[in-house]
Image (tube, grey):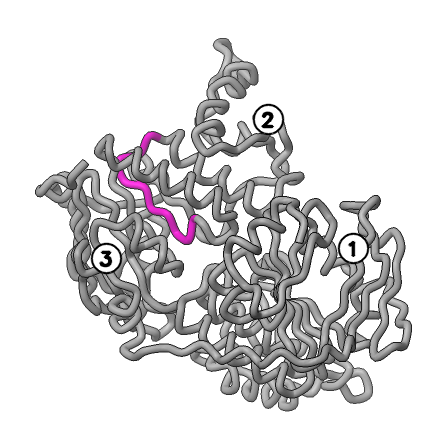
Amino acid sequence: MTPQDDPILVMHGIDKRFSGVQALKSVDLAVHRGEVLALIGENGAGKSTLMNVLGGVIQPDAGRIEIDGRETTVGDVRHAMALGIAFIHQELHSLDNLDVAGNVFLGREPRYGGPLQLIDRCRLHAATVPYLGRLGLEVAPETPVASLSLAQRQQIEIARALALRARIIIMDEPTSSLTPAETHRLLDVINDLQATGVSVIYISHRLSEVEIVAHRVEVLRDGRNAGTLRRDEIRHQAMIRLMVGRDLSIPSQVQARAADEFLQIKDFRTEAYPDAAVSFSASRGQILGFAGLVGAGRSELARAICGMDARRAGGIYLAGRPVRITCARDAIDQGIYLVPEDRRKSGLIGPMTIRENVTLSDLGRYARLGWIRRAAETQAATQQCQAMNVAAPSVEARVSNLSGGNQQKVVLGKWLSMRPKVMFLDEPTRGIDVGAKAEIYHLMRRLADRGVAIVMISSDMEELLAVSDRIMVMHEGRITGTLEQEAFSEEAVMHLAVGGTP
């Protein structure tokens, strides 16, 4: 379907300021019926702030919003939903204490008649099934959300938006935790939606997806409109230039060399896959990429090695010496650090400041006679913010107020302020922009050059092939093969990821 000429939505001159920081500066945006509009920009460019204004989460300081040609004020989230606006947030808002169906129809559950207005669970579960099927999500409606993977929870958020039958759907990084197959299915769903006249505002740092799905691209930079690309102008480099004002580079992979096997994992068994014994090694000076489909056991393996989850059996060796890790503190004391997949849940404490987060794992270093030395904390946090290019007013800024890319930099800064020997990075660039990605890639290479062994778990095929020095692939808890640089290809990785033999 070709987008219709009359815009369903117009945002004009939107301003928004937070604590003296101008987040949006006279931003304009128009969306047509049946159009997929990609909204892109670096972290902190104002994309999420603009969408929070449209979704009724926050109110603008100036500007106007028109829907169907009529000026309106989106008072709150419920008002936005009543106007036909659904918002799939980057940071998931699913409720762990409910089942899948309860999340999909939250606040709109079918009920029995009578004074008690009890929820009709049979109707609720039956109404949920078509939306799960549309996304190819093979879970039962009564499945507790707490038992689902991050990727499955993200699909539940998408199912909720579909169930709203909205006219405008805002998708903020909807594929950041999805496999390639799940991503393709979502793009097919988006095509189906726009064919029926639904408009989609698609926010993504995966520019290859934008090239496939978008009718038009609107770019924000530093809270302002930076430019618009029509369908025939949408190219990877054109988008990057508008986003960051320059071309970006990815650090070169190191030449193949003999592995020193600094970190050795022998016959390791996790609680998730107790029957699968895993053995591998990671070398100083190299980046070992870990590939696999969602549920392959990569994150579970990293968490168990780093003492966050229990292990069934197996040995961990550093430079040939066995080490005992029974909890996360043991791993930290050995210089083995994990940057987790879900930074909000496991990597940061949102209400705390940057300073408090950076120093939290090594507080003894900043204490004297039991008292924390605030000046020493501030100095260390400031050094990390400068080294990592964290965009924040000061180290006293709350981490929850930072963009996703800057939050990830704070997580990395926390560990880099210590003395890493081995670093596991689980989806290190999930949901962050191309500029921040390039910075993190260069940081990883500098760490490797300093002799740190880097293990990078990633579902981004382009990232794996471009950044890794070796790639190890897992399937159902087992390592199915290892690829050296000369054998790198998407086909080779996927062959092993689905259980193929080397």
Does the stretch in magenta take in 173? yes
In the depicted structure, whether residue 296 falls above or below residue 423: above
Q: Which residue lies at the image location 77% right of the left edge and 64% below the top edge?
A: 280
Q: Is residue 444 above or below residue 149?
A: below
Determine the residue positioned at 61% across, 61% down.
457
Q: Are marks 2 and 1 in contact (CB under 8 Å)?
A: no
User: Residue 305's x, y, as percent?
Assistant: 78, 62
Q: Give the labeled residue for mark 2.
A: 140
Q: Residue 346: x and y, percent?
A: 65, 60
Mark 1 lies on residue: 309
Res. 310 image quadrant = bottom right
Left or right of 159, for residue 475: right
Contact between labelled residues 3 and 2, with CB atoms less than 8 Å apart: no
Badge number at residue 217: 3
**What's the residue type where badge 2 is placed?**
Ala
Amino acid on which the number 1 mark rests in the picture:
Asp
- The first of marks 2 and 1 along the sequence is 2
Q: Residues within 10 Å of mark 1 (few under 14, many from 20)?
A: some
Q: Considering the numbered disc 3 on the image, is that residue within a helix, a strand or a loop? A: strand
